[in-house]
Image (cartoon, helix red, strand yellow):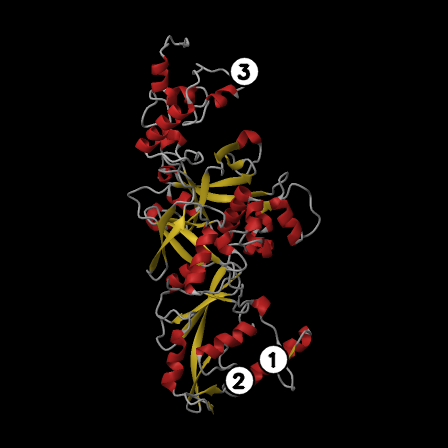
Amino acid sequence: MTTSLQDGQSAPGRAAARGLGLAQVCGVAPGRGDASALAARPPGLPCRTLLPPLEGSQFCAADRRKKKDLNVLEMPSIPNPFPELCCSPFTSVFSASLFPKANSRKKQVIKVYNEDGTSRALEVPSDITARDVCQLLILKNHYIDDNSWTLIEHLPHIGLERTIEDHELVIEVQSNWGMEEENKLYFRKNYAKYEFFKNPVNFFPEHMVSFATETNGDLSQALILQNFLSSSTYPEIHGFLHAKEQGKKSWKKIYFFLRRSGLYYSTKGISKEPRHLQFFSEFGNNDIYMAFTSKKTHGAPTNYGFCLKPNKAGGSRDLKLLYADEEQSRTCWVTAIRLLKYGMQLYQNYMDPCPGRSGCSSQNMSPMRSISENSLVAMDFSGHKSRVIENPTEALSVAVEEGLAWRKKGCLRLNTHGSPTASHSSSTNLAIHRAQPWFHHRISRDEAQRLIIQQGLVDGVFLVRDSQSNPKTFVLSLSHGQKIKHFQIIPLEDDGKMFHTLDDGHTRFTDLIQLVEFYQLNKGVLPCKLKHYCSRIAL
């Protein structure tokens, strides 16, 4: 008895020889060719052929021999782990589906430098942010995290650098660098990074800012920030800046306007009329940089320059350089552009420095500590128990008494055996300050100003250095009102003992450490108290 096949094959022997393939075509599991399995198939399901019933023993014996030859065991079917290999023979071997997908967390190596020339190589994921890199370096080097550590993009070939915002991707920043450029990432303090959220009045002088709504009297700090962070209104920044005329090497002083739609300049004096305004730049595809070699590299008229540079590869050819007449003006322009470009993202970075990444979780982070004005309080240790002096008048009187006591005698210190002594040898007093992070030895006045500007023109940022004009004296360089002032520390000899003073001997200190500690708590003759020391850390 023969059964006709749809493809014209009719021999039962041929069907039996190809029984495995026919069984698979009909949906029967391989190795189970009994008639009951075929009979159980629903009639509506298509099948290419129906095999004739074979004798059970003959089929099973042949099937077992075939399994033994193929070394196949009776086991449940296992899902194919490589379904992409079961492709059509007409498909190209190098199909895109055969290649592994790119891993977004792929590791890359970055190199971070410090001011003293030291560097450290870090293996980081491709989506790491600038804040994550800073946090990693803080933990590895056991630094105190006060939310002022910053990653700096340094472009020496064009004399520019900028603060990489905490939320920016570091690998994305590096991808815009040219192969021939010797750009670097620096890790340093920047106390002014978010200072405008604390004291916006110091960053936005009245003569440079115009608000959309009429204001009566002075604006509160909260209202100023609300105007800058609002999505509907944005204050207008205006003022004179030096810019290069197109196709010329000379600089021209032009009146500029900063609005939400971009940066404009007036072709007729200080006129704001639309017909006199020309578009200069937008900020969506540009980053704001500070110029640190202005006159040498660009032949600029002042040292207070900033630049708008496209954030793409080869963007160094399309620089837009602008120069202000003073530091306060430059700081106002740069801060306003940062707020305009990033808006609420900056405020979120300030309020929440570690937004929930695994590497910055509260379990893995060291507690935030900072030595600043807000963490120093007046204490009274005269009684059996110490207490915090909350009354400002009482705290002021205690400070005056403390100053009078320091004028009369030096502070007692412990010698190497632990016993108190009234004075040290002159050699010890002269050398004890050299290990302090705020002391910078024989650096010049310009170098001191450069270091303070790099770490932020915030009130109270300071350093102590050797005087170049008088080898026996020291100089205290202090930032106040976005200006850097220098105070000479004069040595004074009295009764065979050497002292240091800032006020012509009225307040005397046996060494520089006492002097710095005193002015961290008391303003004295200085315009403000010493708050943040300017240091060069090693990685």
Quarter occupied by the N terminus: top left
**CA gap, disc 2 and disc 1:** 11 Å
User: Which disc is residue 407 wearing?
Assistant: 2
Q: Which residue is mark 3?
A: 43
| Residue 325 versus residue 191 in the image, above or below | above
Q: Is residue 79 left or right of residue 261?
A: left
State the residue at coordinates (28%, 43%). Answer: 180
Q: Position of residue 291 (x, y in %)?
A: 40, 49
Q: Earlier in the sequence, mark 3 or mark 2?
A: 3
| Residue 345 versus residue 384 in the image, above or below | above
Residue nearest the viewer, comparing 145 with 194: 145
The amino acid pointed to by label 3 is Pro
Question: Label 1 crowding class (10 Å Cα cut-off): few <14, some 14-19, many 20+?
Answer: some
Residue 524 appears in the picture as rendered: no
**CA gap, disc 1 and disc 3:** 106 Å
| Residue 51 versus residue 499 in the image, above or below | above
Q: Earlier in the sequence, mark 1 or mark 3?
A: 3
Q: Which residue is mark 1?
A: 400
Q: Quadrant of residue 424?
A: bottom left
Residue nearest the viewer, comparing 534 with 485: 534
Quarter occupied by the C terminus: bottom left
The amino acid pointed to by label 2 is Arg
Tag nearer the camera, 1 or 3: 3
Q: Earlier in the sequence, mark 2 or mark 1?
A: 1
Element class at badge 1: helix
The amino acid pointed to by label 1 is Val
Q: Is residue 292 left or right of residue 337?
A: left
Element class at badge 2: helix
Q: Position of residue 17 (x, y in %)?
A: 34, 19
